[in-house]
Image (tube, rainbow, N blue to C red):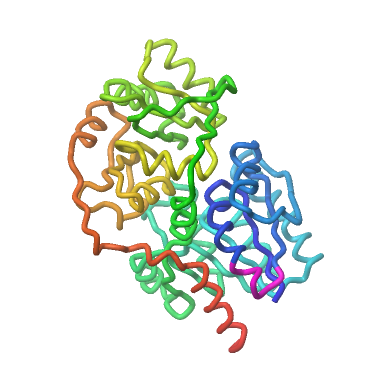
């Protein structure tokens, strides 16, 4: 088959690294990059490091409101689909790129395959919830990372199109975790950063935690008081705010860096004492690595990780974060809710069966 795959954001690049490797063994893949994440260290570095094929189309669409971004992507992706006439479209996750691609395809009667389907937060106040619900319901095949996601789709009447294959990000994590590591981490000034022997690892990018100085100051205040430095990989839109807070508060136990490549992130995760983040992907990677995580948000993204203090919700509050970090986790080696690291192979097998029986 000819399959058009649409990606646009960092988590999708990580998933596509495993997905494209398998898809191209049997099918012709046309890769479309919407441009939602466009900085070198948010986009190009992942293609280089992870061996992702160069996009056949780069739409260069980023910025603007949710409506503006999604609308521009919808128009541009429709043009690609009309030009390429694929047999199917494949999308990952729940970004605006995912929604735009799914809508463009289904209106052209092109089957949609949705990887990482069935995740639910239970609130439409989260814009990604709208994206994932809509995509799941217009898709022909929904591929779920966990049984919890599959069961949620079954309750919505989508069991006949849904398949639990495991988390495709686990495929990529296992691949890169076993490779040697030579750190390539840059500070905000562009100079190399030396990784301390002991450190905490932090990311923080969501609007809820960065809309003003107050929540981010609370988070950084917690990290400042820990017994080892914190490596904080800063999203490009938060550089100025992070620098201002560190200067104003005279924080000296926090190392600000540019966003890191996937190999660096995997190895920072593996070697960190503990992790503080508001990233859905990083909390899973912490779980894979057996490193305790504190997730700074008001809702659970991956309920499978919220066991035995392995991942805990915290408010953007210094005392709450420190209280959660003080708890010890317990790891059950038999508890593996994200599959066996072969999700991409299973996805391609199900697509093969679907193609035969359609």
Where is the C terminus found, in terms of image quarters?
bottom right
Q: How many labels does the image show?
A: 0
Question: Where's residue 290, x and y in %?
Answer: 30, 49
Extent of the magenta region:
22-28
Residue 246, by quadrant, is top left
Question: Where's residue 350, x and y in %?
Answer: 52, 78
Left or right: residue 86 versus residue 45 is: right
Q: Identify the residue at horizontal 65%, vertical 43% (top origin).
A: 44
Residue 245, by quadrant, is top left
What secondary structure characterizes most of the magenta part? helix
Question: Where's residue 239, x and y in %?
Answer: 53, 24
Position of 213 relative to 306 (above/below): above
Viewer-proximal residue, 240 or 292?
A: 292
Where is the N terminus found, in terms of image quarters?
bottom right
Question: Where's residue 327, x and y in %?
Answer: 18, 39
Viewer-proximal residue, 17 or 194?
A: 194
**Residue 25 is a magenta residue:** yes
Position of 274 relative to 107 (above/below): above
Left or right: residue 238 versus residue 321 is: right
Viewer-proximal residue, 66 or 338?
A: 338
**Residue 266 is a magenta residue:** no
């Amino acid at each position: 088959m000819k399959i058009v795959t649409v990606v646009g954001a960092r988590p999708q690049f990580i998933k596509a690294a495993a997905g494209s490797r398998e898809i191209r063994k049997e099918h012709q893949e046309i890769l479309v990059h919407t441009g939602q994440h466009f900085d070198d260290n948010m986009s190009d570095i992942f293609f280089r490091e992870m061996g992702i094929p160069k996009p056949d189309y780069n739409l260069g669409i980023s910025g603007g409101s949710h409506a503006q971004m999604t609308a521009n992507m919808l128009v541009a992706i429709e043009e690609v689909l009309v030009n390429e006439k694929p047999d199917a479209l494949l999308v990952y996750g729940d970004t605006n790129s995912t929604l735009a691609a799914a809508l463009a395809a289904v209106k052209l009667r092109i089957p949609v395959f949705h990887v990482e389907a069935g995740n639910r937060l239970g609130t439409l106040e989260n814009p990604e919830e709208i994206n994932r619900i809509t995509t799941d319901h217009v898709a022909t095949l929904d591929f779920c990372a966990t049984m919890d996601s599959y069961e949620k789709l079954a309750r919505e009447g989508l069991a006949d199109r849904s398949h639990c294959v495991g988390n495709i990000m686990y495929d990529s994590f296992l691949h890169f975790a076993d490779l040697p590591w030579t750190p390539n981490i840059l500070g905000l000034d562009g100079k190399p950063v030396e990784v301390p022997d002991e450190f905490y690892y932090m990311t923080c990018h969501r609007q809820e935690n960065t809309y003003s100085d107050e929540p981010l100051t609370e988070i950084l205040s917690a990290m400042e008081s820990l017994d080892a430095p914190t490596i904080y990989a800063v999203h490009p839109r938060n550089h100025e705010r992070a620098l201002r807070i560190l200067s104003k508060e005279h924080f000296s136990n926090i190392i600000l860096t540019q966003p890191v490549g996937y190999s660096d992130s995997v190895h920072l995760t593996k070697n960190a004492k503990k992790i503080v983040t508001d990233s859905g992907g990083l909390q899973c990677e912490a779980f894979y690595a057996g490193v305790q995580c504190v997730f700074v948000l008001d809702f659970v993204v991956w309920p499978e990780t919220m066991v035995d203090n392995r991942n805990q919700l915290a408010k953007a509050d210094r005392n709450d974060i420190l209280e959660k970090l003080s708890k010890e986790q317990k790891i059950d080696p038999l508890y593996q809710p994200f599959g066996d690291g072969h999700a991409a192979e299973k996805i391609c097998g199900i697509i093969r069966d679907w193609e035969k029986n359609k």
